Image (spheres, rainbow, N blue to C red):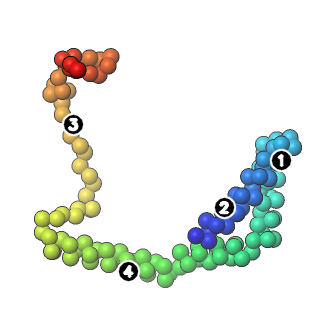
Amino acid sequence: MAFLKYFLIRVGILIPLFVIFMLLGLGAVFSVIAATLIAFCVAYLFFRPQRNAAAESIRTAVSPEARKDRAKKRVTDGDIEDSLIEANPEVGIDNDQKPSARKLPPAEQLGSVDETSRVPKDFTV
């Protein structure tokens, strides 16, 4: 959440600056470059706590402890699936196989179809 907040702050600074530079007639490329540099400087100077919180949230998400927590969650989910299958043998969970392709009926079974409207010729309202 901290990363999203910091991202939105930076975008909230960047977009108005870009619009202002475009209205001043600096051109699209120069406006993007100038707005990006100024937004970076403003965010770097005035939003240090938000930047540090965003960096901490990213560090926490990719830390070894987070990997261990995700692995524990996967094991717990697997145990829950196993207990569900053991308690209800008629329930089947088969996530390891690719889904089978849906078979459509042959065109002969659909009846005659008008090519312009795709409505059967013998259809009446």
Place residue 5 in its image quadrant: bottom right
Q: Dot 4: few (<14), some (14–19), or many (≥20) neighbours within 10 Å?
A: few
Do the numbered discs 3 and 2 sit on residues whose CB atoms are within 8 Å?
Answer: no
Q: Closer to the observer: label 1 or label 3?
A: 1
Secondary structure, mark 2, is: helix
Residue 8 is tagged as 2
Asked if residue 30 shows in the view, the reply is: no
Frontmost residue, 107 versus 97: 107
Kindly report which numbered mark, 3 or 2, lies closer to the viewer in this rendering. Answer: 2
Q: Which residue is mark 1?
A: 21
Residue type, label 4: Lys
Which residue is disc 4 drawn over? 72
Mark 2 belongs to which amino acid?
Leu
Do the CB atoms of the residues marked 1 and 3 lie less than 8 Å apart? Answer: no
Give 15 or 37, whichever is nearer the viewer: 15
Whole-angstrom CA distance, mark 4 to mark 3, is 42 Å
Q: Position of residue 75 (x, y in %)?
A: 32, 78
Quarter of the picture containing the C terminus is top left
Question: Which quadrant is the N terminus positioned in?
Answer: bottom right
Q: Residue at x 76, y 66 (%)?
A: 43
